[in-house]
Structures are given as C-alpha cells and as structure tokens.
Amino acid sequence: MKSVLNYFKEIFSALRSLWGGMRVTGSYFLRPGQIVTQKYPENRKQLKMYDAFKGEVSMPHDENNQHKCTGCGICQINCPNGSIEVISKKITTEDGKTERIIDKHIYHLSMCTFCELCIKTCPSDALAWGQDFEHAVFNKSKLTKQLNQAGSTLKKVVKNNTPANDTIKANSNLENKQTNN
Ligand code: SF4
Ligand code: SF4
C-alpha cells in the first residue's frame, strides 16, 4: 500500500515540476518583448559587445587610413608567445632622409593568450582590443592577420617614441623569467 502511495506521490511531484517549467516558458511566450536571450546570429549587425571585451588585438585606423604604429617592434619583443611579427622597411623621405616605417604588422590570433602586454607597452598607443569574436575558421592560416591596412600611413603627430617605463619593466620581467628558466 505504501509503495502505491509513493508511486502516486512521485507522479504528482513530476507533474508539479513540469508545470513550474511550462509556466515560465508560457509567460515568455505571451510576452516576447521581455525575452533577454540575444537572437544571435540574426542580430549580428546590431550586436554591441561590452567595451572591456577582448576579441582580438587590432590596430585602429582613422578616417584618413592612418595609424599610430611606428614599427618600433616593442610589441613583438614583449609578446610572450611570438604572436606578433613586425616587418619594417626603409624609405627615403621627400627631404632625402632615410626613415624606417612599418611594412607589415602581423598578428597570429591562434597563438594569442590575450595577456594585453603588446597593447599596454606600445609607446605610441597604436594597438587596442577589437571586438570581433567570430574566430571559427576551417583553415588556421586565416587567423594570421595583417593589422596595418593596405595603403595606410603613419599619423604625422606620432614620433618615434622611446620605450615607456612599463615597457622596460615588461622587458626586464621577461628577461628575468628566461634567466630563471
Ligand atoms: S609597439 Fe606599437 S608602435 Fe611599436 S611596432 Fe608595436 S604597435 Fe607599432
Ligand atoms: S595580447 Fe599578449 S599574447 Fe596576444 S599578441 Fe599581445 S602580447 Fe602577444
């Protein structure tokens, strides 16, 4: 007799639990405006990530296709994973001087651990976090990106900066780490 009672108790408890879940689902079904779940990927174009979101390292360019990267290579030195390659080239300016400028700023997203050292230690403030997060690819080579856009130039206001204090600190930390290993 007891086991029959328990059997019906369990059925009742399961139905009550089912009703609780269905009540929530039903209420949102009747008030679709209050659903907080984002309709991704339909809302891809309107989707705005949080400012602090670290999607990938990027190099902001202004409306004149100008960036702030002087090609100093400090970000490459400070990256603990070899995720950055700075390829620079020499050019002759209009007044006959030889100048070194950035040719390609290569970023290997697949090796990046998002430590932010490159961004924090760039003396020209040329790097920032981009908010793109759709990084799924079939071919890993697509995760290697050139951050300086085609035809872009250096902003005139940016001088060839000397390493900032935190860069020197980062370098010395890195060297200590390597010595200890
Ligand atoms: S540290 Fe900054 S300025 Fe120097 S190469 Fe890297 S991004 Fe360019
Ligand atoms: S965030 Fe860190 S790991 Fe990624 S490129 Fe910059 S320094 Fe390298």
Image (spheres, rainbow, N blue to C red):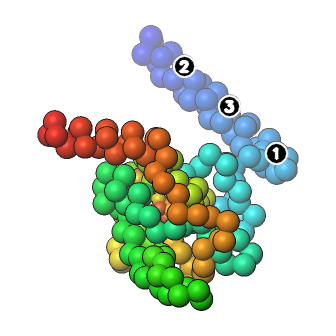
Query: Residue 22: where, in percent of width, then height?
Result: 69, 40
Query: Residue 121: where, in percent of width, then height?
Result: 48, 49
Q: CA distance from mark 3 to mark 1?
A: 19 Å
Is the shortest distance between ligand 2 and the CB of mark 1 under 8 Å?
Answer: no
Q: Nearer the viewer, mark 3 or mark 1?
A: 1
Q: Which residue is mark 1?
A: 34
Q: Nearer the viewer, mark 2 or mark 3?
A: 3
The kind of residue on which mark 3 rests is: Gly
Nearer the observer, 177 or 168: 168
Nearer the observer, 65 or 136: 65
* Quadrant for the N terminus in the image: top left
Q: CA distance from mark 2 to mark 3?
A: 17 Å
The residue that appears at 71% across and 57% down in the rendered structure is 48
How packed mark 1 is, by other alpha carbons closer than 10 Å (few <14, some 14-19, many 20 or more), is few
Left or right, 46 with respect to 77, comes to: right
Ligand 2 is found in the corner quadrant, namely bottom left
